Amino acid sequence: MSVNGQNGEETLVELRGVRAAYGTIEVLHGVDLRVGAGEVMAVLGPNGAGKSTTLKVLAGLHPLAGGDLLVAGRRVNGALPEDLARAGLCLIPEGRGVFPGLTVRENLRMATHRGIPFRAIEEAAYGRFPQLHRRRSQVAGTLSGGEQQMLALARGLATDPAVLILDELSMGLAPLVVEQLYAQVADLARTGVSVLVVEQFARVVLGVADRAAIMVHGRVSDVGAPHEIESKLSTAYLGG
Amino acid sequence: MSVTMNNDGTDARVEQFKAEVAGMRLRDPATGLDRLLLRLGVLGMIGGPLLALVGYFLSHSATGPLQQRDAIVQAILGLAITVAGAALYVKASLAGFLRFWMARFVYEQQAQADRLAKAVKGGPTA
């Protein structure tokens, strides 16, 4: 059951009326969102809007309280996160998600679970981010924030994902590093990987996104082209 | 930046992704295996000793050797069910605990590494 989006590309990921809760408190009240093949979809919104929870639900890390989650046209409610990851859905969580006690090489070795040779993973990672090569024997916890994010991104990309889910890629990073990371994301999208990215800081991500959505109070309030969404952002952040 | 589906590499990856998702095993989270095993384990630990106890009394009250042997077999079966139930219970409990422990371990490790990195860089420690 493939659905074609407005640009003609095939829908790879779709959330239909997704609800989720922490205990008895519902935080997502019917989220509708879709990402096409090779599309960069940015989800923006203020703190507490439910952006990260939406990503966790999509990655299978948080249970659905209602609605449907469709991946490649198949309803995958209740799928295990490891099965989704193995299929090619890669989440890079907020706070980088590297193993701080392992070296850069050891962190990259963790990406061999899809059967890709370690040498190929290293070559791809160091090709994208040469500074990781210089730090390959360094413990990841002692890298700078930007380098840790590069490592997380390199490790995620090494698994050859079909869908990349990024949660607050820019968190705590210098603007220059953020631009470098988003340049990699843009390159990746050009190769056909679908990207769903959640950001609080809109400027850079709207520059690489094909479409964007605004989330407020657990709902998607607006979806549209980046320039349309940009004009509505202040209302979403400030209320009114 | 949208990619129309005319690139061979893109097509192949999308097709592979669709095939992998189609072949994915799905389970209903409401009937999680661990919870089912836990319940089976508790049932075994309650039902097994009862079965063994009934077998014990049956063997005492029986006069024929055939009936006594049947009762003994029943009692041994009860003990086996008890042991299997206990094993299932421990397995299911450990799975839940280990998942929690691993998440906790990764979090602690991250926090410790952050503190060390901050200290090495000369910043104030949390």
Image (tube, coloured by chain):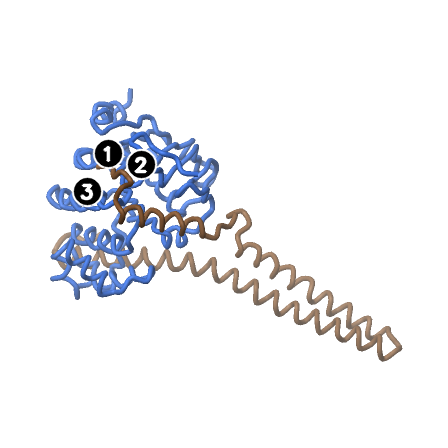
Chain colours: A blue, B brown
> Mark 2 belongs to which subunit?
A
Tell me the kind of residue under disc 3. Ala
Left or right for A205, reference A23: left
> Which residue corresponds to the image point at 17% horizontal and 51% vertical from the top-left?
A145
Residue A74 rendering spot, x and y as whole percentages: 44, 43
Residue A55, horizontal then vertical, whole percent: 34, 42
Labels 2 and 1 within one chain: yes
Q: Is residue A125 left or right of residue B43?
A: left
**Of marks 1 and 3, which one's residue comes earlier in the chain?**
3
Q: Residues within 10 Å of mark 3 (few under 14, many from 20)?
A: many
Of B72 and A115, nearer the camera is: A115
Is residue A101 visible in the rendered image? The answer is no
Tag 2: amino acid: Glu
Mark 2 and 1 residues: CB-CB less than 8 Å, in contact?
Answer: no
Q: Tell me which amino acid carries mark 1.
A: Asp
Which one is in front in this view, the residue at disc 2 or the one at disc 3?
A: 2
Judged by depth in the image, the label closer to the viewer, 2 or 1, is: 2
Q: Quadrant of the N terminus of chain A?
A: top left
Chain to which the residue tagged by mark 1 belongs = A
**Tag 1 secondary structure:** loop
Q: Where is mark 1, residue-wise?
A: A210
For label 3, the residue is: A186
Which secondary structure lies at badge 3? helix
Q: What residue would you read off at disc 2? A: A9
What x and y, as percent, mark residue B120? 14, 59
Could you give the CA–CA distance between mark 2 and mark 3, rounded to whole angstroms? 17 Å
Sequence-wise first label, 2 or 1 = 2
For image coordinates 36% across by 41% down, the residue present is A12
Chain of the residue displaying label 3: A
Q: Is residue A170 above or below residue A46?
A: below
How many residues crowd mark 1 within 10 Å: few (<14), some (14–19), many (20+)?
many
- Where residue B105 sits, quadrant-wise, is bottom left
